Image (tube, rainbow, N blue to C red):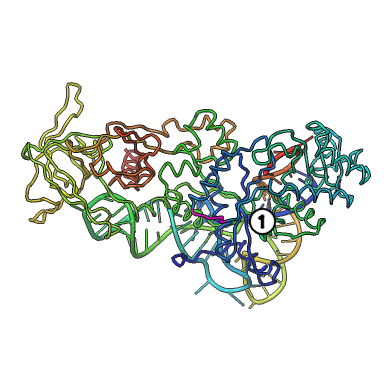
Amino acid sequence: MSSEISLPSNFIRYIINEDNETGRYDNTVVTRFPPEPNGYLHIGHAKSICLNFGLAREYGGICHLRFDDTNPGREEVEYVDAIKEDVAWLGFDWGRHLYYASDHFEKLYAYAVTLIRMGKAYVDHLTADEIREYRGTLTEPGRESPYRSRSVEENLGLFDAMRNGDFADGQCVLRAKINMAAPNIVMRDPTLYRIRKQAHHRTGDAWCIYPMYDFAHCLSDSIEGITHSICTLEFENNRELYDWILDTLDTHHPRQIEFARLNLTYTVLSKRRLIQLVEGGHVSGWDDPRMPTLSGLRRRGVPAAAVRNFCERIGVARRDSTVDFGLFEHCVRELLNKSAPRVMAVLRPLKIVITNYPEDRTETLPAVNNPEDPDAGTRDIPFSRILYVERDDFMLDPPKKFFRLAPGREVRLRYAYFITCTDVITDEQGNIVELHCTYDPETRGGDAPDGRKVKATLHWVSAAHAIDAEVRLYSQLFFKEDPAGDDDFIAGMNPDSLEILSGCKLEPSLAQAEPGVAHQFERLGYFCNDGRDTMPDRPVFNRIVTLKDTWAKVQKTQGASG
RNA sequence: UGAGGGAUGGUCUAGUGGCAAGACGGCGGGUUCUGGCCCCGUUAACCUAGGUUCGAAUCCUAGUCCCUCAGCCA
């Protein structure tokens, strides 16, 4: 933890510091990450996870993982398991502090009974539609339910009957008795319990009434001894009810603090839209490498540390904001540049024959594994007469700033020799099928004894030794910066977000590449073996992120001006 | 137009009455056996109008714009 750079503060730390100064929570910090197990975690959740676990660690406190499982109709163990896996992958440990709101059901029920006894809650037989009508509008007060003045005894009996299953779904609910004219609509006698005759993934058939979020969340926080209950901005209006319930019940009262959720350019982060992508078959699943889900990022090859760094960089505030996706890519590159071993791979092969190199000869040449990490050592790569280079690295009629291979031009093959292009072989249609080059034996290893310079260094692979692979190139799923702003956001999808390349040529060392471990394909980007689709005879690699490409930028401006 | 929030370079975030700072991006340069990394330089902001103050991004007043809320979802 000593390697941490000092970060700018944020408003939450101010609040905690203040609480520590006044001794409000006895100088302890207990936070929690409270996902509902009804979907997969995405990078927006990562912000919350890093915040909650990070603050707890920073202040010497603890952070609970609590599943907010109060709605049996939409929650499943599959999601519970996936969420645990994702949080652990991100690098956080909840230790023995794993909870479920459903753990607290019995206590929650007792609290509800207490509320009834205090005359602060009642069983309402209005239908859902009627409750909506009675609620009023943003500008008009609501009306009181005719069932609002039932006696405590009657309410006690009715609530007991609700629990016993004497009523059908929707027949009645338990409501808090607060104020139907409250300017904050959340306070107009909110529903506390509803009837759901459905099996719950943990409590089975033990219950047929389930607490609503507003009731379960504050009390779960209270029961678990949470001090700072950090949530997103849309719960701001609910804070008044959070406080009301805990004040009325006069029990441990955590402080709810809201922050702005993460938005990212060119991506959607709402659960609803993510589900649409999966169920509509627009992606291959929750862990499609183009998805902003943690499982997608993991499969793509993004290191957890890069996600954590990103979450630190973006900060925490109360204003709505949209982070440039470029910042995320920067964090991924920054980390991978330091850690990823370098290899050579040719994605779009162009055959090269070194005409003055002996046909039966093969030699091995040492290559640096990671210039950023001297301890990474070197490896040997085979060189022979027939090679592949990248098609993009040759141009018949190169423009001004193109430094790579062209007829008559000399370039360096990385860690190998200088070569000069002597002939361009084309087919009947005029397509370039191969290049003939000569090499300078004096330049072995990549330096010319006479000190002559060359403007480009190309990556290459020996044809006879290359591994064939499929490589998947990913780019943004959406064209628009704000895809969610469209009614039909599916129409805004980028049809070329996945490009599959086959017949790619990899250097032999990649035969041992472990799934999910990133390598830099020199001059191209960071890639990793896809653990799911790789077959023994057909490796599949995912592109995690490209390298920055100033040549592409030059090309773009040249294209724009001419 | 009820209530609750929010407005600082293109983007994100600091600032808590005393020189508006950092990161990403952009632009220019250096270095380089990766057009990568690294290094140097540069660009560019306090929503508006008043007020308090020696001094205001910060405090006060008024306004403008944006977000959230009318689930038996969370």
Percent position of residue A116, x then y: 86, 48
Question: In this picture, is A505 found above or below A1?
Answer: above
Q: Quadrant of residue A376?
A: bottom left
Percent position of residue A503, x then y: 27, 31
Residue in front for this viewpoint, A296 or A130: A296
Percent position of residue A356, x then y: 5, 39
Q: Residues within 10 Å of mark 1 (few under 14, many from 20)?
A: many
User: Could you tell me which residue is drawn at 26 percent across and 47 percent down?
Assistant: A343
Q: Which amino acid type is shown beneath numbered disc 1?
A: Ser
Q: Chain of mark 1?
A: A
Q: Taking the image as drawn, is residue A319 in sight?
A: no
The secondary structure that most of the magenta stretch takes on is loop
For disc 1, the marked residue is A229
Segment tinted magenta in the rendering: A91-95
Q: Is residue A406 left or right of residue A179?
A: left
Q: Is residue A115 left or right of residue B53?
A: right
Most extreme residue toward the top is A428
SS for callout 1: strand
Q: Is residue B26 left or right of residue A66?
A: left
Residue in front for this viewpoint, A525 or A561: A525
Question: In this picture, is A245 found above or below A507?
Answer: below
Residue in front for this viewpoint, A412 or A114: A114
User: Could you tell me which residue is drawn at 69 percent across and 42 percent down?
Assistant: A70
User: Could you tell me which residue is drawn at 69 percent across and 55 percent down?
Assistant: A221
Magenta-colored stretch includes residue A158: no
User: Could you tell me which residue is drawn at 49 percent across and 57 percent down?
Assistant: A313
**Quadrant in which the C terminus of chain A appears:** top left
Magenta-colored stretch includes residue A94: yes
Q: Taking the image as drawn, is residue A372 in sight?
A: yes
